[in-house]
Amino acid sequence: MLTIKKHVEPSAEQWDIIIEGVRNPLNSWDQSDSGWDTDGKYTIGDRDLALMLKLSRAGSDHAKFRRMIPILVTITAPLYWWKEFDTYKVGTTANSCSTMHTIHKKPFTTDDFSDELLWGDSHDTLNSIIDDLNFNRQMFLDTGAREFWDSIIQILPTSYNQTRTVALNYEVLRNIYFARRNHKLKEWHILCDWITTLPHSEIITIEGAKS
């Protein structure tokens, strides 16, 4: 399971200065066709978009502007997915719900885990683990003994869901999209599908030189 609670896209002011930077190398600002209309709305022009797509096809060395396009997003996903996501360290920042500090704050339920792909007796196995987690949680709350907390941490399945708020950019999302769009984990497919909904996502998804 992977869910995206909300995300924040680049502002009009950010697009304005990003496009100005795109035209810096050739001093071609006079060819820009993006701008503000009389109602105060900012529109990216066809020529500017075509230039960004051309640079994107040419590879990451030419498309440095993608690193300047920010996205903030809150994602809930299982620990086994976050373990793979942590590959993308450069250009990302994340604040996560703390497992170490809050794992014992409430009883465990099946809603805390990604279990939609379990079949047969595997559901019974998960329920048994949840019972054991709750036993150790209650013993820790009652006694404060560290060994019960340690047991929670060590038997916690990687299907346990964690929420993180993540700062990304279009370059990181491009790396994710092309590396993970055909991955066996369905969580990556959900994320890649979301990427295609972002403003001018073709800057991310367009085929071209290897980045």
Image (cartoon, rainbow, N blue to C red):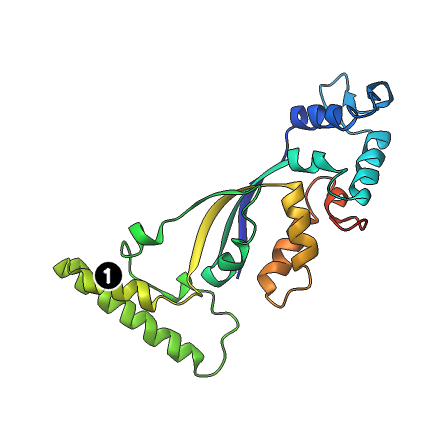
Q: Residue furthest top?
A: 38
Q: Amino acid at mark 1?
A: Trp
x and y, in percent, of residue 59 in the image:
77, 44
Q: Is residue 42 visible?
A: no
Residue at point 23% right, 66% down?
136
Left or right relative to 176: residue 139:
left
Residue at point 71% right, 39% down?
199
Nearer to me, 174 or 110: 174
Q: How many marks?
A: 1
Q: Is residue 110 visible?
A: yes
Residue at point 71% right, 19% down?
40
Nearer to me, 34 or 87: 87
The quarter holding residue 189 reads: bottom right
x and y, in percent, of residue 21 in the image:
73, 25
- Vertical side of 128 occupied by 87: above or below: above
x and y, in percent, of residue 46 in the image:
85, 32
x and y, in percent, of residue 164 in the image:
46, 48
Left or right relative to 19: residue 113:
left
Left or right relative to 46: residue 197:
left
The quarter holding residue 126 reads: bottom left
Q: Residue furthest front?
A: 61
- Vertical side of 169 occupied by 129: above or below: below
- Vertical side of 18 occupied by 88: above or below: below
Query: What residue is shown with label 1?
Result: 149
Secondary element at tag 1: helix
